[in-house]
Amino acid sequence: MDLETKAYLLSVGSVRHGQHLSGERSTAGPGAGGHSIFFRSGNRLVRLAEDPTSPLLLERLEGEAILSCEGREVARGTLVEPLCHCPDQAYITVCERCIYNCKFCAVPILCGAVKSFASIEEMITRAAATGRLKAISLTSGVEVSPEGEVDRVVQLVERLGCFRVPIGVSVCPTKRSNQLLKAAGACEVKYNLETVDRDLFPRVCPGLSFEEIMEALCEAVPIFGRGHVFSNVIVGLGESDRTLMEGIDELAEAGILPTLRPVYPHPLRRGELDMVRPGPERLLRLARYAKRALDRSGLRGDSALTMCYRCTGCDLVPGRDL
Ligand code: SF4
């Protein structure tokens, strides 16, 4: 699968199929609640949400997986079985609830479970037993307060050190989250800005502070190291390319890796925001821009140890895909 094909698949974002597949149910973020598959071709990986109305068709033939659109083959590869949420990592949503109400995200509406430490340790033990576990990544909605959630994840990180793999954490930051997570043993953090359009931010993430998240990201860089701090930036919320490029530059110059994520307009959020999934040309343009910005700042996407820069399923990842 070449870069352009992956960009096309990401722009579609979904797949339909005739057979039963053991797709993974997502519990985090905008796509929460849905099932998805991981398709690998060459050294590229893509995650597609299962959707019976998708224009992409998945068929399996003698161990191969074939993706086609209107009878034309698009890519040929294999399906990859996720460990916990994604291949090679135990990526676990600790708390599937959130007191915030980000307008693209289904988590506050689905109001799912809060996993016990014992159940998480059991999941990771099972993943480790496969011999494929390369990293642990933890994310969490906010059940009561950002401080309470950081405390919970800090305790968990301390307990998970026994698995001896890198641990990355994506949470809502607090004044002390960097110091606490570092001391607990986390090696990477991701604090999501979601949009780099400061005017759009209050509409997308009401109740959250853009500047506080940015401050936490900048503070994290000397603590975790350049290239080990990340922020999701959603593409398709109504922002312009110019604003996105300025945001990419701002993050890269500060030593932060932006994860450019095509928006997933969740059915539960229909009508709340004008969300338009970006086409392949826009995804390629922005990914190439991000690659150049990271290069200028001496940042390498392939040095990431955990989370989405390591997985690559949902994005065009500089340093891995291009
Ligand atoms: S890229 Fe990130 S969100 Fe997507 S499947 Fe991989 S770990 Fe999950």
Image (spheres, rainbow, N blue to C red):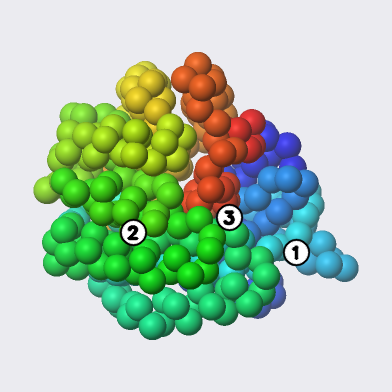
Q: Check residue 59 in the rendering and tell me which mark sits there, or answer none.
A: 1
| Residue holding disc 2 | 184
Cβ of disc 3 within 8 Å of ligand 1?
Answer: yes
Could you classify mark 1 by the number of other residues whose Cα lies within 10 Å: few (under 14), some (14-19), or many (20 or more)?
some
| Residue holding disc 3 | 47
Cβ of disc 1 within 8 Å of ligand 1?
Answer: no
x and y percentages locating residue 40 in the rendered image: 71, 54
Q: Amino acid at mark 1?
A: Glu
- Between discs 2 and 3, the one toward the N terminus: 3
Farthest residue toward the top? 296
Question: Is residue 103 shown to the viewer in this render?
Answer: no
| Quarter of the figure with residue 255 | top left
Could you classify mark 2 by the number of other residues whose Cα lies within 10 Å: few (under 14), some (14-19), or many (20 or more)?
some
Q: CA distance from mark 1 to mark 3?
A: 16 Å
Q: Give the left or right position of residue 292, taking residue 79 as reference.
A: left
For the point 43% across and 49% down, the residue is: 187
For the point 42% across and 76% down, the residue is: 120
Viewer-proximal residue, 269 or 46? 46
Q: CA distance from mark 1 to mark 2?
A: 45 Å
For the point 38% across and 71% down, the residue is: 159
Q: Amino acid at mark 2?
A: Ala
Tell me the element at label 2. Answer: helix
Which mark is in front, 1 or 3? 3
- Considering the image in quadrants, where does the C terminus appear? top right
